[in-house]
């Protein structure tokens, strides 16, 4: 069964990270290229957001008996299961690649990409959280129905 406490904890983490990153909306690629502190804040914040989303997705998939070999496979699988809309899964598939860049290729990151994510794509994280909450509600309803049938 999906660990609702774990997912709720991860959702709270995600909200905290989004709130912090939101403070940096309006940042430019020039600012990131010239201000290492700002760049590190953005890089680390995005890495945390992406990792939390991937962790939640992986947990949900594991509960459904689905295993993936790569982070990039998490979103399409969540779409197939109906946890997130399939068109949304396609639109956020780049998160896994960005995570890998943030972890392994941080010295070669494109500052335009980072600024673009902070300025235009933070809502992707919020939407993911909303879909996870809806999924948890569906599960709760299924459990209630099963209990009624077993009574």
Image: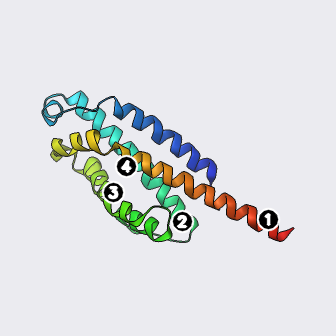
Q: Is residue 122 shown left or right of residue 137?
A: left
Crowd around label 2: few <14 · some 14–19 · many ≥20 (10 Å): some
Dot 4: element? helix
The nearer-to-camera label among 4 and 2 is 4
Q: Nearer the viewer, residue 85 or 75?
A: 85
Whole-percent x, y for residue 22 in the image: 35, 33
Residue beneath label 4, please? 124
Q: Are marks 2 and 3 in contact (CB under 8 Å)?
A: no
**Among numbered discs 1 and 2, the one appearing first in the sequence:** 2
Residue beneath label 3, please? 92
Q: Nearer the viewer, residue 32 or 83?
A: 83
Looking at the image, which residue sits at the far right?
Answer: 151
Q: Is residue 108 above or below residue 17?
A: below
Residue beneath label 1, please? 147
Dot 2: element? helix
Crowd around label 4: few <14 · some 14–19 · many ≥20 (10 Å): some
Asked whether the viewer can see residue 2, the reply is no
Q: Is residue 8 shown left or right of residue 141?
A: left
Asked whether the viewer can see residue 136, the reply is yes
Q: Which residue is drawn at 83% across and 70% down?
A: 150
Q: In this view, does 85 lie above or below 111?
A: below
Q: Is residue 91 shown left or right of residue 3?
A: left
**Among numbered discs 3 and 1, the one appearing first in the sequence:** 3
Crowd around label 3: few <14 · some 14–19 · many ≥20 (10 Å): some
* Quadrant placement of the N terminus: bottom right
Whole-percent x, y for residue 80 in the image: 45, 71
């Amino acid at each position: 069964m999906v660990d609702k406490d774990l997912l709720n904890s991860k959702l709270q983490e995600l909200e905290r990270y989004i709130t912090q990153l939101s403070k940096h909306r309006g940042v430019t690629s020039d600012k990131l290229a010239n201000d290492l502190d700002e760049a590190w804040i953005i890089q680390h914040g995005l890495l945390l957001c992406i990792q939390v989303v991937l962790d939640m997705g992986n947990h949900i998939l594991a509960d459904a008996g689905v295993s993936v070999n790569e982070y990039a496979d998490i979103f399409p699988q969540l779409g197939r299961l109906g946890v997130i809309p399939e068109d949304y899964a396609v639109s956020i598939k780049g998160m896994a690649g960005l995570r890998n860049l943030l972890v392994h290729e941080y010295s070669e990151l494109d500052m335009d990409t980072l600024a673009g994510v902070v300025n235009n794509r933070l809502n992707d994280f919020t939407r993911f959280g909303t879909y996870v909450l809806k999924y948890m509600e569906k599960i709760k309803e299924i459990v209630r129905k099963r209990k009624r049938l077993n009574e």
